[in-house]
Structures are given as structure tokens and as C-alpha cells.
Image (cartoon, rainbow, N blue to C red):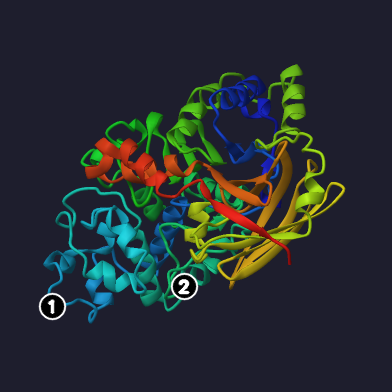
């Protein structure tokens, strides 16, 4: 339960409020989009910030932070005698290898999967996502190196750990971890995205609240103890947090010093002796053993290393810069004030052209065949929204009240909004998929209406602008983090493509036009 977490001021934890104010200023100057920040010292929460509309109660998609939780499940299974680190992968799936499979698959062990050294390359993930049976695909794909030969970061190894755990324990990751990890830490049953066969993705897809991330990270800082009770064996913590493999063999991390200090069992080693659970865009759980501190962030930073730089340029050096249990002062009062007003960037509105609302209201705009979505690109793919395109959109306007409706991938959705007003929380449906979203609508120009659609349990945000011109409308699409920069990040992770990642991402980004097409206005 959250009651187990004791709270204190930054000054009581030996941290200056001035350093936190400095962080807020730097984040704004560097355009680093934080969604939450938690700092714990000596097991107490000294700082907890949220950028509206993100809040303490909203679980977030953690991307590769999930890997560290999957590795923890492996630790429990090893302790219970259900697995060993030397178990061969093929022993769990003995009849799935084809005659022409790469013989190196027979040497892959559980420990190879934990240390990203199975021999599979990240570039294979794109192909895997197009398959129904990910396990069979993994077992029969070509290898890039011999198992154990070198570190090659990817999510496939961790997915296979999830598949192995299901075989070894007879349960999925969430069911297996509920009594062992989540319930003891007071974490409500989480959502974890699955593959087409229903196996948790392992390497990504877990949703936790920032406070839950902090509990998990603190558990490892405290060597497996929580609230006076041992949750994980100290032996496993030592192995998981130790340097189990050299990461310098992976060329995609040559210019990332925080990724070149070694890797444990799905934990990264970084500067100043830090160890971290690490998720794309800045979903971090950072362990600072020498400071007896934990830092957790959720963010939407295309270059997630900028989040680490921000922390090391502001708050982390300030830990122990003053005597613990110091009195608070004016800086703390200012921090409390600014904390109450933190919010993500949001569009602002102007007055639209005279008569425009009456002209477009009550009419349906039909689009030619397309593959566009009103959801961010990665959200669409992660949450299995079909790429069948937008068929039509409709605007019903009375004064400043807008009901926006559209059909996408044969699914109809509608939301009521106040134009140039506040946000609306809603749920959009795409077949069996439900997405909770925060939506705003503004007149962004005299003849343009912009919708800001933010799936609240993800780092992503889509901004869709409708430009009206007589009987036509043009849909202009943008998202944050930008699609092009996200694509570059993926290319950067593929060693062979890294030298040309900038050019490739720009070209590939252009293949998904921001202008989906013009639609002829038709009366219903």
C-alpha cells in the first residue's frame, strides 16, 4: 500500500528545493517533456511531481522498463526451482524448430536471454511483429552471432523469457507476479500487452503508475526487502544488478556513455555507479546506491538520454549538498507553487472566420481510401488498431460546443468538446481495444480546427488539424514525440543503419504523408 511510503521535504532528505527549480527551468529550456518525477531518499519520498493531465493515479506504458520486471519473474522462478539459468531455450519448445533452423539456437540459455546475448539482432523485431507465432519465428530466424559471444540489445530475448515462464510456471507473467511482487508492493493488477497468442510481450507493454515504478526500483535498492519483509532473494538482486556482460560490443551505443558501462539481468549500468530500469522516451527507474536514493521519471523525450543529462545536471548533484533535516525556505514555497501548475504543452485557440461553424456543422466529410489514423503511430501499432484508414469525419457545432465524430477502421467514435476550452476525458473504441484519451479542440487558425488527442496511459500525443476550404477539408497530421524522430531512434538501434539513420527516417517519415487527402463535402 502507498501508506508504506513515508514522505518528507527535499530539504529533510538533504536535497535543495533550488535544485528542483533548476531542473524545471532546464527541462523547459531544453524542451524535455517530463510527465512525472519521483525522488526517494532513505526510503522516503522527497519529491513527487506530475505534469497535468498526467497524475499519480494513471498507469503508464513503460516500454523497456518492462524488461526489468520480466527478469524479476525469472528470479522468482529460479528461486522456486522451476528454472535454472543454464536451461536451454529449445527444451521448452522441443518441436518448433524447422529442419533448416540456425543450429546456434540449440545453445541459447535462459542467461543468454537475460543478458541480451542470445545472438538475435534488433532488426529482426520488425519482421517478428508481422507474425502470429512469435515463438516459432524466434526459434527459426537467422542469428547474427553465437550465443554468449556479444551483447546485442533487443526485445525478442525478453519476450522469449516471458514465453519460457509461461511454460515453466503454467501462468502468464501478471498472474505469476501478482502474489510474489505486485501484491506485496501494493500494486494493483496491471495491464501488460500480449502477443497474438496471448503471451505477455515481456520486453515492453507493462503499465504501472509512477509510484509503482518507484516501489519496484526501491525494492532493488534495498536488496530485495520491502517494509521489513524479503520479497526477492539478495543473491538474485546481486546477480541482476551486477555487470553480467560488456555492452561496448554493441555499436549502436558508441555515443551513449550511459549505455556503455555494462548490463545485468535487464538492468543498465550508468554514470556514478548508477543502475537503471530503462524504457523508451524516458521511462526510468534509477538506482543510486551511493546516495541511497531512487529517481523515477516518465517522459516523452525522443532522445531519452537527454532526460538522464537533465537529472545529472540538476537534482542528482544536489543530493547531500545540504545537511539532512534542514529547514525549508522560500525556494520550497516557490517549488510547491510551481508544482501545482505543471502541465504539458497544449494548443491555444483564436477566433475562427465568421460563419465557419455554421458552414461545417452537421455535415459529414468523406475521405478517399487511406491508411491514416487519429491515434499516434506507435499507439496504433502497440494496441493493435487496424490500419484501415479514416472513412469520414463529422462536426456538430452549437456556439462553442463541438461533437466530433469519425469512422476509423470500421469503428465509430464520438466525443463532446468545448472549442477553445478545457480538456475532455473519453474512451475511444477500436474493436476490442479501448483507449482512454484526453482531448482538446481549438480554432488554431481562421479556417482551421485542431484536435489534441492524448492517450493518457502512453507518452504519446496526436495533433490533427482540419483545414476547411469551401466544400473540402484537408486533414493534417502531427504527433509528439514526432514520428520521424521516433523512427530515427529505431534506426539508431540497428547497427548497420545507424550511419544513415537521419536520412532513412526522413525518407520513411515522408512515406506517411501529414496530409492524408482532401475530402468532398457531402450532405447526409
Please name the residue that numbered disc 2 is placed on: 172
Question: Which element is circle 2 on?
Answer: loop
Earlier residue among tags 2 and 1: 1
* Horizontal relation, residue 211 to residue 76: left or right: right
Q: Position of residue 466 (x, y in %)?
A: 64, 47
- Tally of numbered discs: 2
Q: Residues within 10 Å of mark 2 (few under 14, many from 20)?
A: some
The N terminus lies in quadrant = bottom right
Viewer-nearest of labels 2 and 1?
A: 1
Q: Position of residue 349 (x, y in %)?
A: 74, 36
Please name the residue that numbered disc 1 is placed on: 99
* Horizontal relation, residue 264 to residue 327: left or right: left
The front one of 416 and 59 is 416
Q: Which residue is rendered at x = 27% and y = 47% of the image?
A: 244
CA–CA distance in space, label 2 to label 1: 30 Å
Q: Position of residue 235 (x, y in %)?
A: 37, 54
Question: Which element is circle 1 on?
Answer: loop
Q: Which residue is rendered at x = 39% and y = 61% of the image?
A: 75
Residue 57 visible in the shown view: no
Q: Position of residue 370 (x, y in %)?
A: 49, 60
Residue 406, image quadrant: bottom right
Q: Residues within 10 Å of mark 1 (few under 14, many from 20)?
A: few
The C terminus lies in quadrant = bottom right
Residue 77 visible in the shown view: yes
Amino acid at each position: 500500500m502507498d501508506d508504506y511510503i513515508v514522505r518528507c521535504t527535499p530539504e529533510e532528505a538533504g536535497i535543495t528545493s533550488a535544485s528542483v527549480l533548476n531542473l524545471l527551468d532546464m527541462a523547459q529550456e531544453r524542451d524535455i517533456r517530463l510527465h512525472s518525477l519521483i525522488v526517494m531518499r532513505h526510503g522516503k519520498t522527497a519529491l513527487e511531481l506530475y505534469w497535468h493531465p498526467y497524475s499519480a493515479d494513471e498507469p503508464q506504458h513503460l516500454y523497456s522498463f518492462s524488461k526489468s520486471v520480466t527478469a524479476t519473474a525469472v528470479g522468482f522462478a529460479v528461486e522456486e526451482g522451476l528454472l535454472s539459468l543454464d536451461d536451454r531455450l529449445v527444451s521448452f519448445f522441443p518441436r518448433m524448430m524447422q529442419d533448416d533452423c540456425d543450429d546456434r539456437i540449440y545453445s541459447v540459455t535462459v542467461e543468454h536471454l537475460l543478458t541480451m546475448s542470445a545472438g538475435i539482432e534488433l532488426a529482426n523485431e520488425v519482421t517478428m511483429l508481422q507474425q502470429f507465432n512469435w515463438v516459432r519465428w524466434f526459434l527459426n530466424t537467422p542469428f547474427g552471432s553465437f550465443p554468449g559471444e556479444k551483447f546485442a540489445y533487443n526485445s525478442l530475448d525478453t519476450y522469449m523469457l516471458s514465453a519460457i515462464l509461461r511454460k515453466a510456471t503454467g501462468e502468464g507473467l501478471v498472474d505469476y507476479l501478482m502474489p510474489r511482487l505486485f501484491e506485496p508492493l501494493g500494486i494493483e493488477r496491471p495491464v501488460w500487452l500480449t502477443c497474438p497468442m496471448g503471451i505477455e510481450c515481456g520486453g515492453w507493454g507493462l503499465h504501472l503508475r509512477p509510484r509503482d515504478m518507484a516501489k519496484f526500483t526501491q525494492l532493488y535498492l534495498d536488496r530485495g526487502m520491502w517494509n521489513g519483509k524479503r520479497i526477492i532473494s539478495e543473491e538474485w538482486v546481486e546477480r541482476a544488478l551486477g555487470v553480467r556482460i560488456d555492452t561496448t560490443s554493441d555499436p549502436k551505443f558508441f555515443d551513449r556513455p550511459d549505455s556503455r558501462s555494462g548490463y545485468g539481468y535487464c538492468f543498465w549500468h550508468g554514470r556514478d555507479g548508477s543502475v537503471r530500469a530503462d524504457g523508451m522516451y524516458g521511462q526510468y527507474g534509477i538506482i543510486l546506491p551511493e546516495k541511497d536514493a531512487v529517481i523515477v521519471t516518465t517522459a516523452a523525450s525522443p532522445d531519452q538520454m537527454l532526460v538522464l543529462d537533465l537529472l545529472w545536471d540538476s537534482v542528482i548533484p544536489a543530493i547531500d549538498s545540504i545537511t539532512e533535516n534542514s529547514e525549508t525556505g522560500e525556494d520550497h514555497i516557490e517549488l510547491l507553487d510551481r508544482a501545482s501548475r505543471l502541465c504539458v504543452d497544449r494548443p491555444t485557440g483564436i477566433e475562427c472566420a465568421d460563419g465557419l461553424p455554421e458552414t461545417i456543422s452537421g455535415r459529414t466529410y468523406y475521405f478517399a481510401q487511406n491508411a491514416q489514423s487519429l491515434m499516434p503511430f506507435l499507439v496504433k501499432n502497440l494496441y493493435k488498431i487496424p490500419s484501415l484508414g479514416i472513412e469520414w469525419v463529422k462536426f456538430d457545432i452549437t456556439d462553442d460546443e463541438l461533437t466530433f465524430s469519425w469512422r476509423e477502421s470500421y469503428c465509430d467514435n464520438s466525443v463532446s468538446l468545448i472549442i477553445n476550452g478545457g480538456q475532455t476525458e473519453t474512451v475511444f473504441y477500436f474493436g476490442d481495444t479501448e483507449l482512454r484519451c484526453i482531448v482538446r479542440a481549438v480554432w488554431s487558425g481562421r479556417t482551421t480546427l485542431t484536435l489534441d488527442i492524448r492517450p493518457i496511459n502512453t507518452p504519446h500525443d496526436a495533433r490533427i488539424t482540419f483545414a476547411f476550404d469551401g466544400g473540402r477539408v484537408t486533414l493534417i497530421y502531427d504527433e509528439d514525440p514526432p514520428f520521424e524522430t521516433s523512427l530515427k531512434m529505431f534506426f539508431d538501434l540497428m547497427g548497420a543503419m545507424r550511419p544513415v539513420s537521419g536520412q532513412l527516417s526522413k525518407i520513411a517519415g515522408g512515406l506517411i504523408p501529414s496530409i492524408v487527402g482532401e475530402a468532398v463535402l457531402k450532405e447526409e
